[in-house]
Amino acid sequence: MHIRLSFVFLILCVGCGREGAFEDIDTSTPIVSDIPNGKPMEYPKLYVDNDLPEYAGAIVTGSGSQVESLKDGVTVTAVSNDSIDLIMPFYVEAMEKLGYTYDSSKYDRSQLVADTPMSMLVFTKEKLRLSVTLTKLEQQQTEIKTNFSED
């Protein structure tokens, strides 16, 4: 019995050191240690009511102290395991579908920089404004900070 258990343990240990041994582990949802009470937060009602995009797989880690009025702006912070290069095109497409505009030349120039540590775009529609700031974090995560306001 001890020999079989030792053999199984040895096989597991060898598998742990082998490249690609655990490639099928799902890492689509970030593990964020600073989530309040260990529970992901939700997007504020004002954000959701305006049909603003929510990046799939991101965990909301914070919102501004004020989430009731667009005059002061509604800030939401989230974390994703995806790269800036995957996240920003999502916001561009989603905001265009909602009728928002942005400085496309600035966006195009930012696309030329490989592996940029930060990217920011501002989307506008009439008096509404959504700024999206993406910052590369350690452990290949990206912070997504959005601020929605009305001028």
Image (spheres, grey):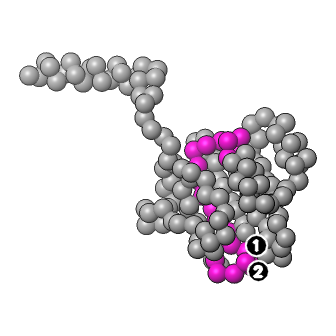
Tell me whether the residue at label 2 lies in contact with that at label 1, contact meaning CB atoms closer than 8 angstroms. Answer: yes
Picture coordinates of residue 111, whole percent (x, y):
82, 39
**Viewport quadrant of the N terminus:** top left
- Is residue 51 shown above or below 111? below
To which residue does mark 1 refer?
A: 149
Name the amino acid, label 1: Ser
Q: Residue 34 vs residue 47: left or right?
A: left
What residue sits 44% from the left and 63% below the top?
A: 39
What residue sits 24% from the left and 24% below the top?
A: 9
Q: Tell me the element at label 2.
A: loop
Q: Residue 34 vs residue 89: left or right?
A: left
The mark found on residue 31 in the picture is none
Q: Is residue 63 something that shows in the picture? A: no
What residue sits 63% from the left and 62% below the top?
A: 77
To which residue does mark 2 refer?
A: 71
Q: Which residues are magenta?
A: 67-87
Sequence-first disc among 2 and 1 = 2
